Amino acid sequence: MTSPTFKTAQEEFWAGSFGTEYILRNQGDALLASNLNFFCKALESARNIGSCLEFGANIGMNIRALQLLYPGIDAHGIEINADAAKELAEIVDASNVYNKSILDFVPDRQWDLALIKGVLIHLNPDILPEVYDKLVRSTSRYLLVAEYYNPTPVAIPYRGHNDRLFKRDFAGEILDQHSGIRLIDYGFAYRRDPNFPQDDISWFLMERC
């Protein structure tokens, strides 16, 4: 049974105690270093990024890396978990933090870069087309999607929970749904990288055309 505040069980899951516990597992200097290395590679083909919006920003570990890579970047983040959003507001202006579900977010402007990393895999598959639309509407230039990849949709148990992790070709579905977006680069980040491990994510950099 979902809270009346949210449309899906997955939103309620991440807004609650599980989402807060996630904070403790995903922070620290080693992760920041890995994220900086990740964005150096994933955004190598991008130019003149002065603003960004991250969907599902958590406490801002990705944004912190982008702030190092692009000093002075106008960074904004959407985060459903109130505890994470509070910490996010310590590294970006509080007015740039949207403490709400992605489904409740309505973009009123565009950013040079729209980013989502390790979030689409945790969303209810039924609402993905709506989220894809929001991602595309939010960017004036680049869209970076970094998620677990699988050529066909599949659900995988996640830390003892069912229907909380899904793998599929997210970028391919975005490209199929939006003809005004083209793929310009892609790659893979491996959890066994000896220097800068990530979580076996495939990344796709797309651009408006």
Image (tube, rainbow, N blue to C red):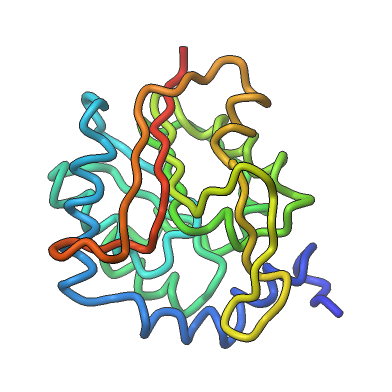
The residue at the point 71 percent across, 39 percent down is 129
The residue at the point 52 percent across, 20 percent down is 181
Report which quarter residue 35 is drawn in: bottom left
Q: Would you say 159 lies left or right of 114 here?
A: right
Quarter of the image with the N terminus is bottom right
Report which quarter residue 94 is drawn in: bottom left
| Place of residue 65 in the rendered image (x, y in percent of width and height, measured from the top left) | 21, 55
How many badges with numbers are in the image? 0
- Residue 84 higher or lower than 32, as above or below: below
| Place of residue 157 in the rendered image (x, y in percent of width and height, measured from the top left) | 65, 75
| Place of residue 198 in the rendered image (x, y in percent of width and height, measured from the top left) | 31, 61
- Residue 69 higher or lower than 86, as above or below: above
| Place of residue 45 in the rendered image (x, y in percent of width and height, measured from the top left) | 25, 26
Q: Would you say 126 lies left or right of 114 here?
A: right
The residue at the point 62 percent across, 38 percent down is 132
Foreground pick, 109 / 60? 60
- Residue 118 higher or lower than 42, as above or below: below
Q: Would you say 155 lies left or right of 7 here?
A: left
Foreground pick, 102 / 186? 186
Report which quarter residue 69 is drawn in: top left
Foreground pick, 92 / 65? 65
The residue at the point 62 percent across, 48 percent down is 168
Q: Kindly give the residue lying farthest to the right in the view shown.
A: 1
